[in-house]
C-alpha cells in the first residue's frame, strides 16, 4: 500500500515504458509477464491541471486497480489535492475528464514473435454527480498501471505548487531517476516528445532551452524536493542531446510543512474526526476517506450504535478496523433506517398523488365516453324535449336561433351553450362495477377506484 503523500504518475509510467523498451515483469497479472514492450505513447498535449488530475486519480485508485473497475473521489477532496480553489466549477472538471477520456494510449507489443497494436483512452469513463467524481480505467491499462516495478513516486504537496505544465512534466520524468542521480542522455527529438513540446517554435534550440528547460528547471529547484541541472551534448556547434543531473533539494525541509497539509479538507471532515476519536491513526483515517468515505461512515455509525448497546468487546478502533478492512457487510444504523423510512413514506405519498391524478383523468374519460354515447343515442323527440327544457331555464334571449324542426341552434354560441347544458344533464353516475369493467376493457390493469368514486 502506498504512503499517502506519495502518488503514482500515469504519465511517468507511460514515459518509462515508452523509452525503456525493456522486458517488464507485470506483477502477476497474466501470461504477458515476460513480454517485451515495443512502444507505448499518448497522443495529445495535457495542460497542467489535466496532468495533476491524472496523478491524483491514479493515487486514489491504485490499491484497488486490479480488484475494482470503478473508483470514486469526493470533488472537494479532489480539488484540495489538486490545489485548486474552484471546487464549484464543475464545468471545468468536466472539461478535464472529457480531455482524459479522449486522450488515447497506444500499445505496440511483441507477442509470440508478432506485433500487436492496442489503443485505449486514458480514462474509459468519467462522471460528476452529487459531489462525487466517479471514473474507470480500461482493464488492460489498469493491469499495467499497477506494476510496482515501473512507478515513480510524486509528492502531491509538491505537485500542487507547480504553475507550469512543462515544469511538472520535467519533474515527473526526473524524480524517478533520483536514486541514480541522472536521467541519462535524451536525444532532443525524444526529449521534446517526453515533455510534450510539439510546437514548431521548439525546432529552434534557443526557444526550447528558454521555455522548456531553463524556466521549468528554475521552478523545480525553487519548489520541489529535487534539484536538477542540465547538461548538453553537441555535434559540432549543434546541440543534439540533453541529460539532467538530480540531487536532493537543500530547501526540502522548508517545504515539508506545506506538503503535510495536502489533506486539509479531509482533516476538517466529520468522518475523519470521528475516526480519530475512536483511536484510528491519522494516515489510516485519511486513506479510508480517500478510498471509500461512504463505507467508513457506515462502519463508524454501525460500531457506535453497537457500543451504545454495550455490544462491542474490546476497543471500538479494533472493531472498526476489522469491519472496514474485511469488507464485511455492515448493518444499517438507526439514522439510516429512519432516513430510509422517511424516504419510503415520502415516495409512497408522491405515488399516491400520481395515482389519484391518473384516477381522476380516467374517471373523466369514462364519463366523457358514456356522455357521448348518451347524446348520440337521443331520438329527435328526446332532443326536442331537452331543448325546450333548456329554453325555459336559459330564457328566450339565449335561444333565438332555435329551430324546432331539427331541434338545432343555428347560432354557434347558442349551440355550444346548449351542448354543454345537455352533456351535463346526460352525464351518468359512476357505478363501481361498470367502471371496473370499463377499465378492464380499456386495458388499464391494476388501476382501481383509489379516489373512492361517489355517485355524481
Image (cartoon, grey):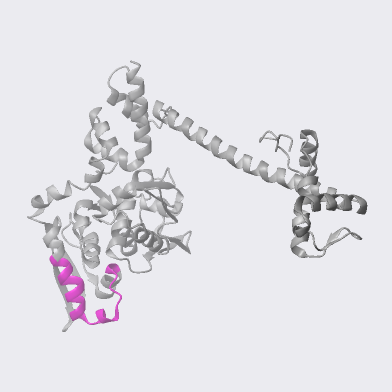
In the figure, residue 284 lies in which quadrant?
top left
Question: Can see residue 203?
Answer: yes
Nearest the viewer among 30 and 210 is 210
Instruction: Classify 427 as above or below 19.
Output: above
Specify the quadrant that holds the C terminus: top right
Q: Is residue 213 magenta?
A: yes
**Looking at the picture, how far across and down is residue 44, in whole percent?**
36, 69
Q: Is residue 434 left or right of residue 404?
A: left
Give the x, y percent position of residue 406.
Answer: 90, 60
- Looking at the image, is 117 positioned above or below residue 421? below
Please, which residue is most extreme toward the bottom here? Answer: 237
Q: Quadrant of residue 442?
A: top right
Q: Which residues are magenta?
A: 194-218
Q: Would residue 329 be seen by someone viewing this image from the given angle? A: no
Residue name at image x 33 percent, y 19 percent: 308
Q: Main secondary structure of the magenta part?
A: helix
Q: Quadrant of residue 170?
A: bottom left
- Left-right relation of 23 to 413: left
Percent x, y of residue 116: 48, 63
Left or right: residue 77 versus residue 400 is left
Queried whether the magenta region covers residue 361, the answer comes back as: no
User: Residue 430, percent across and down?
Assistant: 76, 38
Q: Residue furthest front?
A: 396
The count of marks equals: 0
Q: Return the residue nearer the eye: 261 or 323.
A: 261
Location of the N terminus by quadrant is top left
Amino acid at each position: 500500500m502506498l504512503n499517502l503523500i506519495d502518488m503514482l504518475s500515469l504519465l511517468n509510467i507511460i514515459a518509462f515504458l515508452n523509452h525503456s523498451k525493456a522486458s517488464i515483469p507485470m506483477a502477476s497479472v497474466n501470461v504477458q509477464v515476460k513480454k517485451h514492450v515495443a512502444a507505448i505513447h499518448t497522443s495529445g498535449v495535457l495542460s497542467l491541471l489535466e496532468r495533476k488530475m491524472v496523478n491524483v486519480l491514479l493515487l486514489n485508485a491504485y490499491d484497488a486497480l486490479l480488484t475494482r473497475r470503478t473508483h470514486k473521489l469526493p470533488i472537494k477532496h479532489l480539488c484540495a489535492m489538486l490545489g485548486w480553489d474552484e471546487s464549484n466549477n464543475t464545468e471545468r472538471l468536466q472539461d478535464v475528464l472529457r480531455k482524459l477520456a479522449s486522450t488515447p494510449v497506444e500499445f505496440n507489443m511483441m507477442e509470440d514473435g508478432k506485433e500487436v497494436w492496442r489503443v485505449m483512452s486514458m480514462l474509459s469513463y468519467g462522471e460528476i454527480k452529487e459531489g462525487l467524481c466517479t471514473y474507470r480505467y480500461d482493464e488492460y491499462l489498469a493491469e499495467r498501471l499497477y506494476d510496482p516495478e515501473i512507478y515513480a513516486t510524486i509528492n502531491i504537496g509538491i505537485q500542487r505548487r507547480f504553475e507550469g505544465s512543462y515544469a511538472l512534466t520535467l519533474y515527473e520524468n526526473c524524480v524517478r531517476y533520483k536514486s541514480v542521480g541522472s536521467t541519462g542522455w535524451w536525444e532532443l527529438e525524444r526529449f521534446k516528445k517526453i515533455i510534450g513540446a510539439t510546437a514548431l517554435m521548439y525546432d529552434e534550440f534557443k526557444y526550447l532551452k528558454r521555455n522548456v528547460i531553463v524556466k521549468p528547471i528554475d521552478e523545480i529547484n525553487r519548489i520541489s524536493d529535487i534539484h536538477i541541472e542540465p547538461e548538453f551534448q553537441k555535434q559540432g556547434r549543434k546541440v543534439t542531446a540533453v541529460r539532467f543531473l538530480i540531487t536532493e533539494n537543500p530547501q526540502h525541509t522548508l517545504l515539508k510543512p506545506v506538503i503535510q497539509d495536502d489533506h486539509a479538507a479531509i482533516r476538517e471532515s466529520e468522518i475523519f474526526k470521528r475516526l480519530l476519536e475512536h483511536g484510528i491513526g491519522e494516515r489510516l483515517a485519511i486513506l479510508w476517506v480517500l478510498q471509500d468515505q461512504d463505507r467508513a461512515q457506515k462502519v463508524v455509525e454501525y460500531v457506535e450504535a453497537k457500543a451504545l448497546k454495550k455490544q462491542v468487546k474490546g476497543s471500538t478502533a479494533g472493531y472498526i478496523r476489522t469491519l472496514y478492512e474485511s469488507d464485511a457487510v455492515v448493518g444499517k444504523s438507526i439514522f439510516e433506517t429512519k432516513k430510509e423510512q422517511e424516504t419510503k413514506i415520502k415516495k409512497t405519498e408522491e405515488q399516491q398523488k400520481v395515482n389519484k391524478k391518473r384516477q381522476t383523468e380516467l374517471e373523466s374519460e369514462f364519463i366523457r365516453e358514456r356522455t357521448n354515447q348518451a347524446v348520440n343515442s337521443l331520438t329527435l323527440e328526446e332532443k326536442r324535449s331537452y331543448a325546450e327544457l333548456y329554453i325555459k331555464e336559459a330564457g328566450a334571449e339565449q335561444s333565438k336561433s332555435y329551430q324546432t324542426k331539427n331541434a338545432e341552434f343555428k347560432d354557434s354560441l347558442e349551440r355550444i351553450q346548449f351542448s354543454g347544458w345537455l352533456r351535463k344533464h346526460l352525464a351518468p353516475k359512476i357505478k363501481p362495477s361498470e367502471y371496473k369493467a370499463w377499465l378492464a376493457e380499456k386495458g388499464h390493469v391494476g388501476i382501481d377506484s383509489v379516489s373512492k368514486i361517489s355517485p355524481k
